[in-house]
């Protein structure tokens, strides 16, 4: 997580600021630096550091603490976004590709999503959960064709059916549950809805 969308820097630019080749920086200087300035994206292949903390370290000044607590402008990784939404990182990427999440923003190649957007997506899942139905006191809108209409997982289910023609839906459902979270029973319902309303075929 990048707290509050703060400016960041990677090790290539840190080495340039220190006036040494990157290989020298990583061999000679990086271990001590990392002890004092932790990466903002632990577990990620992207080693990004807070710019203000990095500048303080290079100048020999006390390293300022990062802001504490959650903030709407925090930038979350795919893993962190997945944790908030209760899905897998691969589903986060699929949501972004299909328009159910924004493409996000990038910092040195790392793809990130603002916390306020992720929380809004969590609290306003299409047709389900908090914010998913009509507000109290408002007239009911057009009835859904089926329970999973507008559910972003329907597209994933339809694609899985196309890619696995002839495979029993129970087996596809188990694979989707393992890849994207949820239960095989829910995914089997999604597959049935996709077969009926997306492909017009329900052979399973």
Image (tube, rainbow, N blue to C red):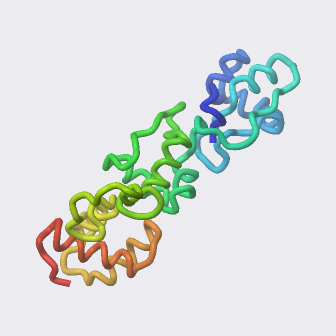
Q: Is residue 194 above or below residue 82?
A: below
Front-most of residues 196 and 175: 196
Left or right of 29 in this view: 174? left
- The structure residue drawn at horizontal position 38% and vertical position 57%, both measured from the top left corner, is 137
- Quick one: which residue is furthest to the front in this view? 137
Left or right of 179 in this view: 82? right
Q: Is residue 146 above or below residue 64?
A: below
Front-most of residues 7 and 167: 7
- The structure residue drawn at horizontal position 83% and vertical position 35%, both measured from the top left corner, is 36
Which image quarter: residue 193? bottom left
Q: Quadrant of the N terminus?
A: top right
How many numbered marks does the figure carry? 0
- The structure residue drawn at horizontal position 76% and vertical position 33%, both measured from the top left corner, is 66
Q: Position of residue 179 (x, y in %)?
A: 43, 68
- Quick one: which residue is furthest to the left in this view? 200
Q: Position of residue 40 (x, y in %)?
A: 67, 39
Q: Is residue 180 above or below residue 94?
A: below
Which image quarter: residue 32? top right
Which image quarter: residue 182? bottom left
Q: Position of residue 190 (x, y in %)?
A: 30, 72
Q: Quadrant of the C terminus?
A: bottom left
- The structure residue drawn at horizontal position 32% and vertical position 77%, both measured from the top left corner, is 172
Q: Position of residue 65 (x, y in %)?
A: 81, 32
Left or right of 24 in this view: 108? left
Q: Is residue 23 above or below residue 176?
A: above
């Amino acid at each position: 997580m990048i707290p509050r969308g703060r400016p960041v820097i990677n090790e290539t630019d840190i080495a340039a600021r220190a006036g040494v080749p990157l290989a020298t920086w990583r061999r000679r200087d990086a271990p001590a630096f990392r002890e004092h300035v932790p990466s903002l994206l632990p577990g990620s292949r992207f080693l990004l550091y807070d710019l203000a903390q990095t500048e303080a370290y290079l100048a020999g000044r006390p390293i300022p603490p990062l802001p504490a607590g959650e903030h709407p402008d925090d930038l979350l990784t795919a893993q962190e976004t997945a944790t908030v939404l209760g899905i897998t990182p691969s589903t986060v990427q699929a949501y972004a590709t299909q328009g159910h999440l924004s493409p996000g923003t990038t910092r040195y190649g790392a793809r990130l999503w603002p916390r306020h957007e992720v929380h809004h997506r969590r609290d306003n899942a299409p047709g389900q959960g908090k914010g998913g139905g009509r507000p109290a006191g408002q007239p009911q809108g057009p009835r859904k064709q089926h329970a999973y209409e507008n559910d972003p997982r329907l597209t994933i289910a339809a694609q899985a059916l196309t890619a696995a023609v002839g495979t029993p839906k129970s087996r596809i459902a188990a694979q989707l549950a393992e890849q994207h979270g949820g239960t095989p029973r829910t995914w089997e319902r999604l597959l049935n809805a996709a077969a009926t309303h997306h492909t017009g075929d329900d052979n399973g």
